[in-house]
Image (tube, coloured by chain):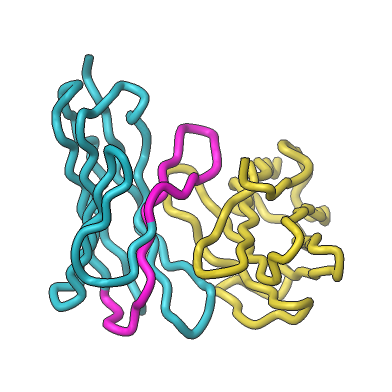
Amino acid sequence: ETGVTQSPTHLIKTRGQQVTLRCSSQSGHNTVSWYQQALGQGPQFIFQYYREEENGRGNFPPRFSGLQFPNYSSELNVNALELDDSALYLCASGADFEAFFGQGTRLTVV
Amino acid sequence: QKEVEQNSGPLSVPEGAIASLNCTYSDRGSQSFFWYRQYSGKSPELIMSIYSNGDKEDGRFTAQLNKASQYVSLLIRDSQPSDSATYLCAVREDSNYQLIWGAGTKLIIKP
């Protein structure tokens, strides 16, 4: 049990739609990161938030955006969904250098 | 481009033997190193972290770090069928929390 919870666990959306994925972290975990993992690949860093401010971003377009809230929850928003956005989306949080993952959201874009 | 390289496998090891997994990284500024285990369809689970050169043991797992050679390895002693999974190596600089990941090595423990 990592104390990191993601919702929903599975989601099917149509190309062009928008989606919001949610993550709830443990109290005291000031940092939250989001990753995209395509089948058979390692996770790819999307962005990171520290105390509600984005402080790092990977090579993802602006249609990937996020928010972190004071209650240690966060969101990943993806606009104008594309077929290649189909992947496992992972939220990770931690208070030190170690990152603990939620169970992930499997997004399928059709 | 910061990279983390792993042999994709599959690596097949008999039950009870030692499984050895390797990882190399390109950024000499990397300070924190992690091994995650990922079962099919599940999220990665942290099994070992190592920050200084040498060995770190935790139960059946031993992580080894050599910063001069830029490699980190994971040894699994007395391998069990339940150890069959993909093992991901991740590396982080001190300056931020971003993890750079390898693509993972698929490990198969044969009974």
- Assess whether residue B32 is covered by the magenta stretch: yes
Residue at image position (76%, 60%) is: A27
The picture quadrant where one finds residue A40 is top left
Query: In the image, is residue A35 above or below residue B92?
Result: above
Residue farthest toward the right in the current orientation of the protein:
A70
Residue at image position (26%, 56%) is: B56
Quadrant occupied by the C terminus of chain B: top left
Q: Nearer the viewer, residue A17 or B39?
A: B39
Q: Which chain is cyan?
A: B
Q: Nearer the viewer, residue B40 or B46?
A: B46
The picture quadrant where one finds residue A31 is bottom right
- Assess whether residue B37 is covered by the magenta stretch: yes
Residue at image position (35%, 44%) is: B87
Q: Nearer the viewer, residue A77 or B34?
A: B34
Query: In the image, is residue B12 above or below residue A76?
Result: above
Query: In the image, is residue A70 above or below residue B95?
Result: above
Whole-percent x and y of residue A26?
73, 56
Q: Nearer the viewer, residue A43 or B94?
A: B94
**Residues rendered magenta in the picture:** B26-48
Quadrant occupied by the N terminus of chain B: bottom left
Whole-percent x and y of residue A64?
71, 67
The reply, left or right, for residue A63 in relation to residue A17 is left
The picture quadrant where one finds residue B75 is top left
Residue farthest toward the top in the current orientation of the protein:
B111
Colour chosen for chain A = yellow
Whole-percent x and y of residue B40?
47, 32
